[in-house]
Image (cartoon, rainbow, N blue to C red):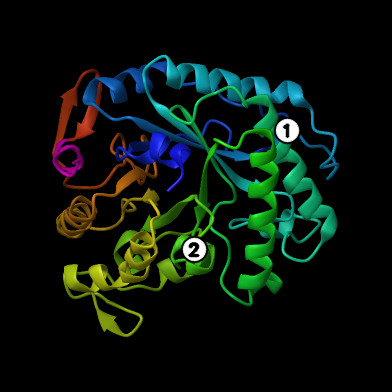
Amino acid sequence: MSSAVDLAFGTPRYGFNFQWMVSWEEGRAPEPPDERALDWLAKQGFNFIRIPVDYRFWTKDFDYLHPDERMFEHLDRYLDAARSRGLHMSLSFHRVPGYCINGNNLERDNLWTDVVAQDGFVHQWSLLASRFRDVSSEYLSFDLVNEPPKIGARDFTRDRHEAIIRRVVAAIRSFNPDRAIVIDGLEEGHAAMPELADLGVVHGTRGYQPMTVSHYQASWWPPGMTFPEPEYPGTVWFDQPWDRDAIDRFYAPWREVEAKGNRIHIGEFGCYNKTPNDVALRWLTDVFGLFKQYGWGYCMWNFEGTFGIIDHGRAGARLEMVDGYLVDRDLLDLMLGSRV
């Protein structure tokens, strides 16, 4: 295990995703860091934020090689806000040149097959590696590409993924050999990558299984609208009933990668607010219990909003004012109790 990885993730990291720069629209400016929320995280003992970003904030007309680097100043501010509170920041490309798990049709090129997109992907990470070369991995990691697709989708293969990941890791390390790097699992974050177990990076997975529970009535994901109201334990997904043992089996390939000397981190997890509260809490109790058993850190999607801990809008949740926020008390207790 590299010293950079150990510095960044040797102590499990717990926190939330913040969507300040996650989705570009014409005329939309990045949001400033939410200082109040970061104060709250630090006070509760959380130590991690993940910042998903969209490369279009600094790239115009698919000119990947000439980004407006003034936009990186927003990333500087996010990092400064996190470091000043002792929080680690993971910078995550949610939309990269040629790929995004949501709205991929907006991309002109294909990251997995087109050299122009691959060159742009490597170039932009190289710029960021150079910009932050003097920042310790204690405070900053790079999460390369959010949720690569399923095998066969968009001409995606394991070999193509492995080649571009190895290339961009080498490029980053040419500027800063001590940068902690995170790679997301395949199959939209869920499939382990033993072929990259030698790379000396953090392997990032997800905490959404079974999706019949976590994504019930999620309108942006068409299958979510077809599920019956979930039960847990017992909901059926991929032709099997799910309970704690089934979730444990799902993570077995990740524990095998971990056994080869790698850190595992849950880059996203959460439960959409349409799932009945009692079902959500039973499922989350098992999920958090397994994370604690494994000693894995996690990052909830998100802090405020329909998957979060603040203002999620789930009927029946027990709300309590905690340091200025109206919080889902039971969910917060589960999170606090799951840390090691």
Q: Which mark is residue 221?
A: 2
Q: Residue furthest top?
A: 84
Q: Is residue 43 above or below residue 300?
A: above
Q: Is 78 on the left-hand or right-hand side of 204?
A: right
Name the secondary structure under disc 2: loop
> Badge 2 local density, few (<14 within 10 Å), some, or many (20+)?
few
Query: Front-most of 25 and 174?
Result: 174
Q: Is residue 334 magenta?
A: yes
**Residue at label 1?**
127
Write the residue at 22% across / 25% down.
Answer: 44
Q: Where residue 2 sits in the image (x, y, percent)?
A: 46, 44
Residue 232 visible somewhere in the drawing: no
Q: In terms of image quadrants, where is residue 283?
A: bottom left
Q: Is 142 on the left-hand or right-hand side of 238?
A: right
**Range of magenta residues:** 329-340
Assign the magenta stretch its main secondary structure: helix
Q: Is 250 on the left-hand or right-hand side of 328?
A: right
Q: Where residue 202 sits in the image (x, y, percent)?
A: 45, 49
